[in-house]
Amino acid sequence: MRKNLIKRNIRKGARFYRKATRHLRVLPDFIIIGAQKCGTTSLYDNLIKHPSILPSFTKEVDFFNKKFHKGVEWYRAHFPSVVYKYCITHIYKRDFITGEASPDYIFYPHSPKRISTVLPGVKIIVLLRNPVDRAYSHYYHEIRQKRETLSFEDAIGMEEERLRGEFEKITNDENYYSFNYNTYSYLSRGIYIEQLKHWSNFFNKEQILILKSEDFFEDSQAVFQRTLQFLNLPSWQPEYFGKDNVGYYPKMEASTRCRLLNYFESYNYRLYEYLGVNFGWEK
């Protein structure tokens, strides 16, 4: 009993300290905005091992999508203090940046405007995965969370009906939260071109680093170094590259995969034209 009481008091004291000093905290230098199920956790967890990067107190703060009403000071409370930054940069003579990773940001229509208003100079990192694989991984994530009961084929067949009118409601009311839009958007989240074009209305291309998830999975070191260069940090690598917990699920039906490859073909082609890079997601 006494040990539990001590733990509760420590947590209460930590919350009080963060609240009392939140106006003395830095704001993030970078944000990993998505996409969901594309390796954002792996990239972020490896980045924060770098000696010049400190993490937010919560990896997915979700401020610019779900919690914007809490205010910037609430958001600021999730990051290191100004005093700590001064010690690192002036006493220990080390670079210092901080950031967060909320993979729903890329898909939420109000996020880019909000971020550009609060953090106009922030660096944006995006991971994009073959949208067919992303959708399948997303589906099994919802199965594990017990938010989905339909088969994958039925779920993607029902997506249009489940999401009908939700985007318009969110667009018209910044305070509207849509469970369906957030949960059952298996195919919609994979239409990357529309999302990136929307973000380009608020940030210039030099502020946005777009990475192919498959490259990160296959050669983590190379993609990691590219990310450090984007963040203007010295080359460094962890002792080992930690990876997301891999979800094990049945192989997708060949006919379903073929149908989805056809579905995404035109969207992917437009994405390749926009980026000037072919990601080779034709299989």
Image: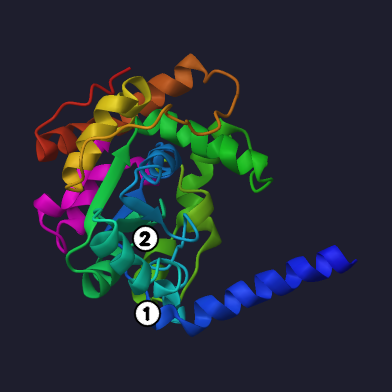
- The reply to whether residue 267 is in sight is no
Q: Looking at numbered disc 1 in the image, what kind of residue is underneath it?
A: Leu
* Res 24 quadrant in image: bottom left
SS under mark 1: helix
* Res 240 quadrant in image: top left
Q: Does the residue at mark 2 contact the one at mark 1 (Cβ under 8 Å)?
A: no
Please count the marks in the image: 2
Q: Which mark is residue 108?
A: 2
Label 2: how many Cα within 10 Å (few below 14, some 14–19, many 20+): many
**Image height check: is 68 above or below 235?**
below
- Relative image position of residue 190 (x, y in whole percent): 35, 40
Q: Residue at x 37, y 67 (%)?
A: 84
In-front residue for pair 176/214: 214
Q: Looking at numbered disc 2 in the image, what kind of residue is underneath it?
A: Tyr
Q: Is residue 70 left or right of residue 247?
A: left
The residues bearing labels 2 and 1 have C-alpha atoms spaced at a distance of 29 Å
Q: Residue at x 18, y 68 (%)?
A: 120
In-front residue for pair 132/17: 17
- Relative image position of residue 200 (x, y in whole percent): 15, 56
SS under mark 2: loop
- Does the magenta portion include 208? yes
In-front residue for pair 25/64: 25
* Res 213 quadrant in image: top left
Image quadrant holding the C terminus, namely top left
Q: Provide the residue span drawn in magenta.
A: 188-211
Sequence order check, earlier mark of 2 and 1: 1
Image quadrant holding the N terminus, namely bottom right
- The reply to whether residue 58 is in sight is yes
To which residue does mark 1 refer? 24
Q: Is residue 148 left or right of residue 187?
A: right
Label 1: how many Cα within 10 Å (few below 14, some 14–19, many 20+): some
Q: Residue at x 31, y 55 (%)?
A: 31
